[in-house]
Each structure stands twice: as structure tokens, then as C-alpha cells.
Image: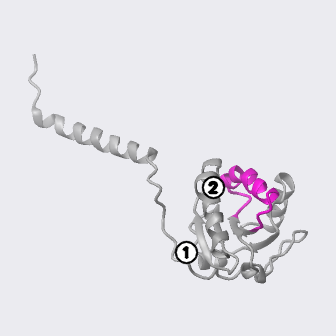
Amino acid sequence: MAKVRPLVLIPPAIFAALAGLFAAGMYLDDGQELPSALIGQPAPGLPEERIAGLPPLDPAVLADGEVKLVNFWASWCPPCRVEHPNLTLLAEEGVPIYGIAYKDQPANSAAFLRELGNPYAGVGQDPEGRTALDWGVYGVPETFVVAGDGTIVARMANPITTDVLEDRLRPALAEAAARGD
């Protein structure tokens, strides 16, 4: 019978331990995400580029006294399709949502909204991603809760799933509404 050297078992044991840590890290949600330096700050500007056939963005809406969402999205973004029904639900509940099409072709953006419905009170186009940089967007979809005075209250750097909607977005909307009282 061959004798097993104990040192031979060390590399597989280290690999197994690291693989276990990485696997556990993928499924643990500690509620942390990349921070936004804009929380508590005035919202940056909105893009001027329009998409034909869609309601334009008016920069005055950022500080119009009403709590709102600013959503960065794209037609080529699968998670944007996932969150779309929840954005539609919020719009039906009366939450104003302003959409910014990120690095997308205008015709594709318009077709996306024709297919799925348009939850946006206004839509702008950010073809080169300059507005997204000003807002600190890492990727789409990202949604910002903006208080009535134009201050950013929260950032959701993920799709608005049912869990995100109930656990994070609705409380952020309530916080933004309380700022106006």
C-alpha cells in the first residue's frame, strides 16, 4: 500500500476552503453595495437629448416639490426587462419616474418602451454615458430616489425586483417624502 504524504493534501485542502468561501460569498447578502457620494447632495443635471415620440425630460422636475425616481436603463440590458414590471407598478401608483436611456440607440429605446409599456413621465437619451458619469452610475439598471427639493436620498444599483421594491425602495420613497414635511 502506498504511503500518502501529508504535504500533498495541503493544496487541495486550501483550494476546497477558498472555493467554499467564494461560494458562500455569492449567496450572502449583507445589504452592502458600492456607496454613492451623491446621497444627500443635489441631483446632477438631466440629458438634453430626446427620443422622438417620447415625452422629454424637463430639468425643472428634479426640484419640483415631488418625490421621484430617476432610472438609468437600456434596451440591450436584460435586468432592465426584469425590473420593468415593478417600475410600471410604481408609475401606476403615482410615483413619477424619469428614464434615461444609457448608451442606447434611440430607435431601440423607443421599441423597448412600445413593447413593454412606458412607465416614464419623461425620457432622455445619454448616448455617450456622460450624464451617467455625473450621477455616478456603474451600470444599468440603476435607480435614484430624489426628494422634492432635488436631493438624492437613495440609490439602487441593481434591478428593482419585488424584494428590492419592498425592502429598500419603498422605505427610501417614504424617507424622501418625509423630508418635505
For the residue labelled by badge 1, is the local secondary structure a helix, a strand or a loop?
loop
Pick whichever, 143 or 21, lies toward us: 143
Mark 2 surroundings: few (<14), some (14-19) or many (≥20) residues within 10 A: many
Pick whichever, 87 or 174, lies toward us: 174
Seen at 48% across and 61% down, the residue is: 33
Residue 76 placement (x, y as % from top left)? 71, 57
155 lies above or below 164: below
> What is the span of residues highlighted in magenta in the rendered image?
73-98
Query: Is the C-beta separation of discs 1 and 2 under 8 Å?
Result: no
63 lies above or below 3: below
Pick whichever, 2 or 64, lies toward us: 64
- Residue receiving disc 2: 159
> Distance between the Cα atoms at labels 1 and 2?
19 Å
- Residue receiving disc 1: 39
Identify the image quadrant of residue 19: top left
Identify the image quadrant of residue 134: bottom right
Kind of residue sitting beneath label 2: Pro
Does the magenta portion include 96?
yes
Seen at 58% across and 57% down, the residue is: 168
Seen at 82% across and 56% down, the residue is: 92
Q: Is residue 55 left or right of residue 18?
A: right
Residue 106 placement (x, y as % from top left)? 81, 68
Q: Earlier in the sequence, mark 1 or mark 2?
A: 1
Kind of residue sitting beneath label 1: Ile
115 lies above or below 142: above
Mark 1 surroundings: few (<14), some (14-19) or many (≥20) residues within 10 A: some
